[in-house]
């Protein structure tokens, strides 16, 4: 839990958090949103038969892995198959 929040020169200062903590949170939030969007697109592609069940499972694992290279590769595959 946060200790306190105060406004200093139009900036929010949060006791106990550093700017890098906030940047890490923003990055993880953006990544979480990207994962959800990619997963939604993947489910749509499965529903309209652009990919089969095996591809869906494999790409889902890649999207949800913590490996950014797997995630990026999955997005490239999805974009290619979507066209």
Image (cartoon, grey):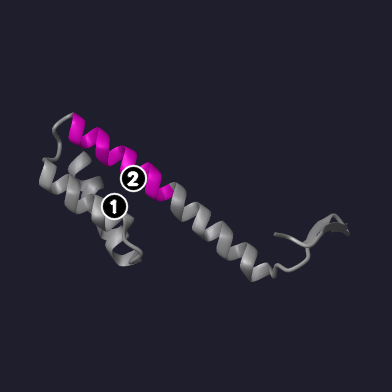
Can residue 43 be found in the magenta stretch?
yes
Quadrant of the rendered image containing residue 9: bottom right
26 w.r.t. 33: above or below: below
Residue at horizontal 25 percent and vertical 55 percent from the top = 61
What is the crowding at mark 2: few (fewer than 14 residues within 10 Å), some, or many (at least 20)? many
- Residue 83 in sight in this render: no
What is the crowding at mark 1: few (fewer than 14 residues within 10 Å), some, or many (at least 20)? some
Quadrant of the rendered image containing residue 26: bottom right
Residue at horizontal 78 percent and vertical 66 percent from the top = 15
Query: Which is the main secondary structure of the residues drawn in magenta?
Result: helix
Q: Are marks 2 and 1 in contact (CB under 8 Å)?
A: yes
Q: Which residue is mark 2?
A: 38
Can residue 65 be found in the magenta stretch?
no
Position of residue 16 measured from the top left corner of the image (x, y, whole percent):
73, 68
38 w.r.t. 24: above or below: above
Tell me the quadrant of the picture where the C terminus can be found.
Answer: top left
Tally of numbered discs: 2
As drawn, the label of residue 75 is 1
Mark 1 element type: helix
Residue at horizontal 19 percent and vertical 36 percent from the top = 46
Give, as a single range, the part of the protein colored magenta: 34-47
Q: Describe residue 11's horizontal placement relative to residue 31 as left or right.
A: right
75 w.r.t. 66: above or below: above
Mark 2 or 1, nearer chain start: 2
Residue in front for this viewpoint, 38 or 60: 60
Q: Disc 2 versus disc 1: distance between alpha carbons?
A: 7 Å
Q: Describe residue 36's horizontal placement relative to residue 22 as left or right.
A: left
Mark 2 element type: helix
């Amino acid at each position: 839990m946060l200790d306190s929040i105060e406004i200093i020169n139009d900036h929010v200062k949060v006791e106990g958090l550093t700017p890098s903590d906030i940047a890490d949170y923003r990055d993880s939030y953006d990544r979480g949103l990207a994962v959800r969007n990619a997963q939604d697109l993947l489910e749509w592609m499965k529903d309209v038969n652009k990919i089969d069940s095996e591809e869906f499972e494999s790409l889902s694992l890649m999207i949800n892995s913590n490996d950014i290279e797997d995630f990026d590769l999955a997005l490239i595959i999805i974009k290619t198959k979507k066209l």
